[in-house]
Amino acid sequence: MKEINSTLARKWMSNKIKLFNSLIGLFLLLIISACDDGSVIKERSWELVWEDNFDGLAGAPIDSLKWTHEIGTDWGNQQLEYDTDRTDNVSLDGEGNLAITARRESYAGSGFTSGRITTSGLFDQTYGRFEARIKMPWGPGIWPAFWLLGSDIDVIGWPQCGEIDIMEYRGQQPNFVHGSVHGPGYSGGAAVSKSYALENDRFDVDFHIYAVEWGPDYIDYFVDDVLYFQITPDDVPGEWVYNHPFHIILNVAVGGIYVGFPTDDTPFPQTMLVDWVRVHKEI
């Protein structure tokens, strides 16, 4: 009787082990399937085609062969600054950085000045890896951005031209950055967007690399080479308008719909430092 019970026990244990191994196999299969659903980026090879390292003397202007100034105020977002072409607002810092500086001052009817530069008319590209190494300013109402705008904006208007915000930042939230796209039916407050947060750190403390990798049917967002956001045509509630040339814009806005007004706690001047900007094409 003891031998029969022992045999039954061995069979029961053997069957239990087989069942356990089967469950483990199924679990691993589910993990593999989940990792194969497109959420893991495919390996890509890149060739550098354009860059600016912002080398030069302190106070020197930007390279006019690579950038132009956009001069004016309220670019459709109720911003408060007047963007100028003065080196007080946009210049090299002598340490290998571009400095875009917002100042509290009366200028051309505005209470603040800042800078907004673009590669429009000088360089644009369809698809590729666009990246910059940037150190943020800080303060309520400060709105730095690194973004791409469809180069046909003057022909078809915005948002039909498309907009790819590689990095936007609210100065009152120094541990968050945001990546977004704007197109017909999903622009402004309805943009397709996602945030990336630092744990126990702030983006105004040190430089970080912000990038997108962009192709015919995808835009992937990175901070320090960490993939945090993927957009495909299925993810936008309107037309996919990202299959034509875009140009680069760097700016520091003051106030506006996205960030609100500066407060008494907002120190000035405020400077965004850009170590470099690079553009690659896939090979």
Image (cartoon, rainbow, N blue to C red):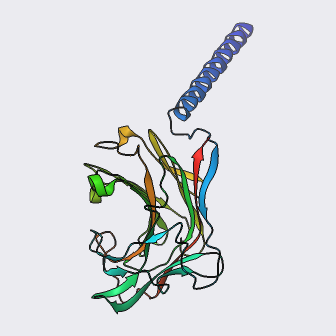
Indicate the position of residue 238 as horizontal and vertical percent values. 28, 43
Left or right: residue 158 versus residue 44 is left
> Is residue 159 visible in this depiction of the protein?
no
Residue 275, picture quadrant: bottom right
Q: Work out whether 259 lies above or below 165.
A: below
User: In the rendered image, which quarter contains the N terminus?
Assistant: top right
Indicate the position of residue 10 as horizontal and vertical percent values. 71, 14
Residue with the most extreme right position: 3
Which residue: 27% across, 68% down?
76
User: In the rendered image, which quarter contains the C terminus?
Assistant: top right
Which residue: 47% across, 55% down?
124
Of residue 177 and residue 24, the one placed in the foreground of this image is: 177
Left or right: residue 217 versus residue 200 is left
Residue with the most extreme bottom position: 106
Indicate the position of residue 66 as horizontal and vertical percent values. 53, 66
Residue 113, picture quadrant: bottom left
Which residue: 39% across, 89% down?
104
Which residue: 49% across, 58% down?
123
Q: Work out whether 247 lies above or below 253.
A: above
Please give the count of numbered marks on the rendered protein.
Answer: 0
> Is residue 22 visible in this depiction of the protein?
yes
Indicate the position of residue 157 as horizontal and vertical percent values. 27, 55
